[in-house]
Amino acid sequence: MAFRFQFGFNMFPEISRRFNTQYRCFSVSMLPGTYRQDVERGGKIIMPPSALEQLTRLNIDYPMVFKLTNKKTNRITHCGVLEFVADEGKVYLPYWMMHNLLLEEAELLNVESVHLPIARFSRFQPQSQDFLDITNPKAVLENGLRNFACLTTGDVIAIKYNQRIYEMCVLETRPGPAVTIIECDMNVEFAPPVGYVEPEKQIRKDDNVVDPADLMPARVGFVAFKGQGNRLDGKKRKDFAQSEIANSKPTYIRGIPDYDYKIGTLTFLRNIKPANNKEIKDPDQFKAFTGEGSSLRKSRK
């Protein structure tokens, strides 16, 4: 009697294998044919067709992200792939990527497929103060990062805007030192550019400041020795100082606050004198133009 066993799952799951190969690296300017500016502006490389055949047979994660390692200097970075049209045994990189890896033309480069977390935060530092002249730097950076697949902490990437190349150092990435930025919602911050010095705040007196003494009403009544005096020859007096003019201003005295004030109430103060209290006048008080006056012409009787 035969028994047939059927299982609804795969007893031998496919083992995940990674792509790990070495190639001779060259800059994009060495690529045969027309110069590829789209490769130079982004963070993706061009690989040979054999790499695509090998990648399709492996159980790798998509989108394809690779770790590039210069084993001579132990410098690493991460990138994506743009096309599989390079010559066999060669890969073509942007110039800024070769500069970060300290690579020369035709040197060996190790290319390994990896899985990176999705970016949530990144912090950049412009390498030139000219970046401050851009009106909307975040929009410029967002547009430039569309040609990138991932970011690595410590890399100096190149962003082209308005026929100029701006270098940006990746100071920090979260949640890890290397992240993928494909279809992600990432917060971006900028550090002060290299060589930037915060301008010192100069405390200067505002010309529009009004002296409270100038707002006080003019003095009423006689003011003794208010005149300045003049010389007969028209010259200024030597014994007259400007401090005397400043001292002639009334002294500004701030009001006394109402310490018994209750919240929610309004108090109106009116200076009304009682009608019964008569004002006592000083008999020696000076009165201007109180004389009778005389006429030079005698009146006819």
Image (cartoon, rainbow, N blue to C red):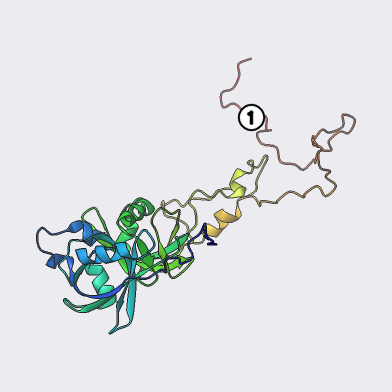
In the rendered structure, the answer to whether residue 27 lies left or right of residue 266 reads: left
Expressed as whole percent of the image width and height from the top left, the position of residue 111 reads 29, 73
Give the answer, above or below, for where 221 lies relative to 98.
above
In the rendered structure, the answer to whether residue 55 lies left or right of residue 269 reads: left
Q: Dividing the picture into quarters, in which one does residue 178 lie?
A: bottom left
Q: Nearer the viewer, residue 259 or 292?
A: 259
Give the residue at the far left of this rendering. Answer: 33
Q: Would you say residue 127 is visible in this rendering?
A: no
Q: Amino acid at mark 1?
A: Gly
Q: Dividing the picture into quarters, in which one does residue 42 lie?
A: bottom left
Mark 1, residues whose alpha carbon is within 10 Å: few (<14), some, or many (≥20)? few
In the rendered structure, the answer to whether residue 210 lies left or right of residue 32 reads: right
Q: Would you say residue 256 is visible in this rendering?
A: yes
Secondary structure type for disc 1: loop
Q: Nearer the viewer, residue 263 or 300?
A: 263
Residue under circle 1? 293
Expressed as whole percent of the image width and height from the top left, the position of residue 7 reads 52, 59
**Rendered residue at 59%/22% (across/down):** 298
**Rendered residue at 50%/57% (across/down):** 205
In the rendered structure, the answer to whether residue 237 lies left or right of residue 26 reads: right
Q: Which quadrant: the C terminus?
A: top right
Give the answer, above or below, for where 167 lies relative to 271.
below
Q: Nearer the viewer, residue 195 or 136?
A: 136
